[in-house]
Amino acid sequence: MTQTPHPFLVVVLAGSRASRDPVAEASGVSCKALTPVGNSPMVFRVLEALQSAETTGKRILCGPSWSVIEQEPRLLALINTNQVKWVAPQSSPSTSAAFVMKSLPEEQPILVTTADHALLTSEIVDYFCSHARLTNSDVVAGLVPSTLVEQAFPESKRTIMRFKDQGYCGCNLFAFLTPQGRMIAEFWRQVEQERKSPLKLIRTLGWIAVLRYITGNLTLAQGLERISQKLKLKITTVPIPFPQAAVDVDTVADWELVQEILEKSATE
């Protein structure tokens, strides 16, 4: 008899990077996670997509602060009825993720995403999680080929990591499939600090890799192999065929783009 795999425990990072967030200020809310998108705070869109997915189970919301939670009755109700577990945010997304993962059962895989993933759908979640399981890796990151993103949203400015084979955009979907994989938090801190500067990030792989990246001779697979060797883990990626998976709300322009996308889809 085939054993049913454990569902992914989900950690949604919803803390604030700074005391004053431009998106929160532009939308008139107390924290970015509550920014309205399609007539609903975007954190609810994320939580609903995760609830509807077939591959996920318990949802854990790390942030926002409890003072913010108390001012949002709908979110407070989800927590008080144990539909969502709340954990206080730590100093950064990586430390928050590491803090939560330490308390979770080792035998269950973990999916980490963010509250500003406003276009997340259950279809995207299930695609990523089901394909991540097949990799037999410790850690898996979701990536969208940049050509798909550029074709779908030509006016949008997304951060692109350009490799020899092609360019990719991140999409804030990370699977931690083994206990060893959860120890990647220290490297994630480096990714956090350099997430808008691919060259600085690639520098962690060594200067030969930097030169190959500059000249366009480093493939994604080669980069992943070097990171895996450096961290003594098997790290891989899942290419995601949904361009909207690469759109998170980092800026006011991103917020406006997301609203335009949803308005357009509502009229189709």
Image: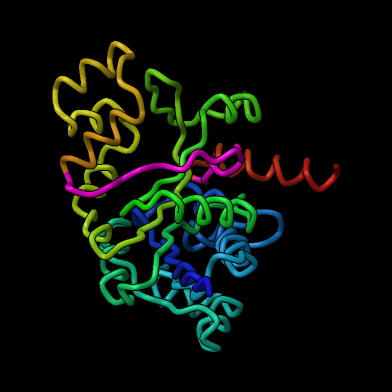
**Is 221 placed above or below 32 here?**
above
**How far from the left and from the top, in percent, is residue 78?**
56, 81
* 194 in relation to 101, above or below: above
Question: Does 202 sit left or right of 124 as displayed?
Answer: left
Q: Nearer the viewer, residue 76 or 137?
A: 137
Q: Residue at x 34, y 34 (%)?
A: 196
**Residue 109 against residue 151 in the figure, above or below:** below
Give the image location of residue 151, x and y in percent: 64, 24
The answer to whether residue 235 is magenta is yes
Q: Residue at x 49, y 80 (%)?
A: 70
**Magenta residues (range):** 231-249
Q: Residue furthest bottom?
A: 81
Give the residue drawn at x 19%, y 28%. 203
Residue 24 vs 160, above or below: the answer is: below
**Quarter of the figure that contains the C terminus:** top right
Q: Can you tell which quarter of the image residue 67 is in? A: bottom left
Residue farthest to the right, as pictured: 268
